[in-house]
Image (spheres, grey):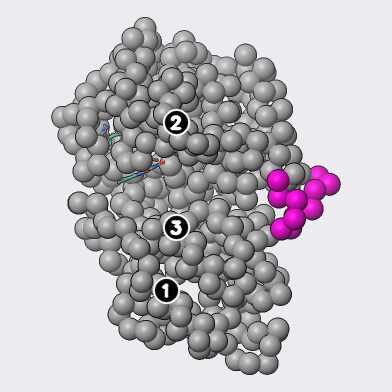
Amino acid sequence: MTHMDKTLHIVGGGMAGSEAAWQAANMGVSVIIHEMRPKVETFAHRTGNLGEMVCSNSFRSDDHEQNAVGLLHWEMLQAGGLIMKTAYTHRLPAGGALAVDRDPFAEAVTEALLAHPNISVSYDEITSLPETGHWIIATGPLTSSDLGAAIARETGADALAFFDAIAPIVYFDSIDMSKAWMQSRYDKGETEEERTAYLNCPMDKAQYESFIDALLDADKTEFHEGETAGYFDGCLPIEVMAERGRETLRFGPMKPVGLTNPHSDIKPYAVVQLRRDNALGTLYNIVGFQTKMKYGAQTEVFRRIPGLEDAQFARLGGIHRNTFINSPTLLDASMRLKSRPNIRFAGQITGVEGYVESAAMGLLAGRMAACEILGVEQPEIPQDTAMGALIHHITGGADAKTFQPMNVNFGLFRPVDGLKAGRRGRKDRYKAYTDRAKAEWQTWLDKIG
Ligand SMILES: Cc1cc2nc3c(=O)[nH]c(=O)nc-3n(C[C@H](O)[C@H](O)[C@H](O)COP(=O)(O)OP(=O)(O)OC[C@H]3O[C@@H](n4cnc5c(N)ncnc54)[C@H](O)[C@@H]3O)c2cc1C
């Protein structure tokens, strides 16, 4: 393969790889998808289809006025997205959610890609990082181990994770600050920003005891087969800590030391800490609260924490097998590996979470790679769109030190001028975000033709 080779190679024909291939091929670029299934299997996929949904059959909310993932659907559809177009064709009734008939959906994605004159599929496993040519790596949360090892060698082992242990993330404007307060433990931190990086929610003894009971009683999700290897290092689910002893949390993530509650003279018995999760200060994660509790149980249990009674969650906690790189340090703004710019990353491996977000990053990577190959300049992706907010988060907005996979959510959006943050007026604010995003996305699409 020479440097002049204008073929785009895409490794992985999942949500991201399929969408990337479709976009680049429609722009006139010749694409080869390298997909290891069905020759090499993963523990979660069941077929050799491209675009297979590994678990739920839902693309989540389809509300493009009040919901960030619904907005992402809309943006992808406007950009001629294959995953979204096919999802609507195979839609099943599911209230406000976009659920699909999974097998016909993946079969239709596969057929569309195989029928495209610019796309061919090679059923092989890629095990190393190619030195030359144009490549997109979209191998997802279950990247094969040889390729994972090659990525770790290139990026440094610390920059590649094999699990995500996600603590729930709360919208700041849903936290009751008449009960919570900002302070870092022992007032540590040099700058004002560091000192205000933490929020604290106090508990008295009775509240702590009933919180532990609720954790022990909550419904939990089982691990998938093959998922657990190596996970217990340093990321125990909070409920497992509680099972080890009723006081474990009070001496662990909920220790009350080095903190002074300005709302009361009574010393807290335990404290739940939340840490700022993005530069905008709109999102806070609950420190050390990774969990395998079911989603319904999480909201019920976490809303028992004083100050979080009305909490809205940008994402709930989880622990999953998930291969992802530290994108904020490794990728440039157009998703190229800084150390090897002939390689882009896309999909869940870049640290987004979910089918829709992965396909969305595939869409952008496919277009960016095609522009590069064709020698066309691509106008900057507008940050105030769902696409823009997400790519900006993974390639720069997120804190590299605490980087964890992220769903699209309105906390990633810059405020709309003239609209106040706060618990009131959320509907108007979300509508303003989606109106602004749609206008900007349409302008961007018009520019690139
Ligand atoms: C167990 C499990 C359950 C999940 N449940 C959900 C859910 O319910 N809802 C949701 O939105 N998201 C869920 N996810 C996340 C979901 O998998 C991703 O959001 C989405 O599929 C990611 O898209 P992707 O294209 O990045 O990866 P994938 O869709 O996984 O595609 C990656 C492709 O790369 C291939 N591949 C891997 N390594 C190589 C290699 N070396 N050479 C060639 N091909 C390779 C794989 O076979 C696969 O086809 C789940 C993930 C897991 C692991």
Q: Quadrant of residue 82?
A: top left
Q: Position of residue 316 (x, y in %)?
A: 47, 56
Count neighbours of disc 3 (C-alpha within 10 A) and say few if under 14, some if 14 to 19, many if 20 or more.
Answer: few
Judging by the rendered image, the residue that carries numbered circle 2 is 93
Q: Earlier in the sequence, mark 2 or mark 3?
A: 2
Residue at 22 percent across and 40 percent down: it is 42
Image mark for residue 278? none
Q: Does mark 1 have its CB less than 8 Å from ligand 1?
A: no
| Quadrant in which the C terminus appears | top right
Report the residue that reaches farthest toward the left: 39
| Residue designated by label 1 | 214
Q: Marks 1 and 3, how far apart in space? A: 13 Å
Q: Looking at the picture, tell me which residue is in the foreground, 357 or 31.
A: 357
The span shown in magenta is: 417-427
* Marked residue nearer the N-terminal end (2 or 1): 2
Earlier sequence position, callout 1 versus callout 3: 1
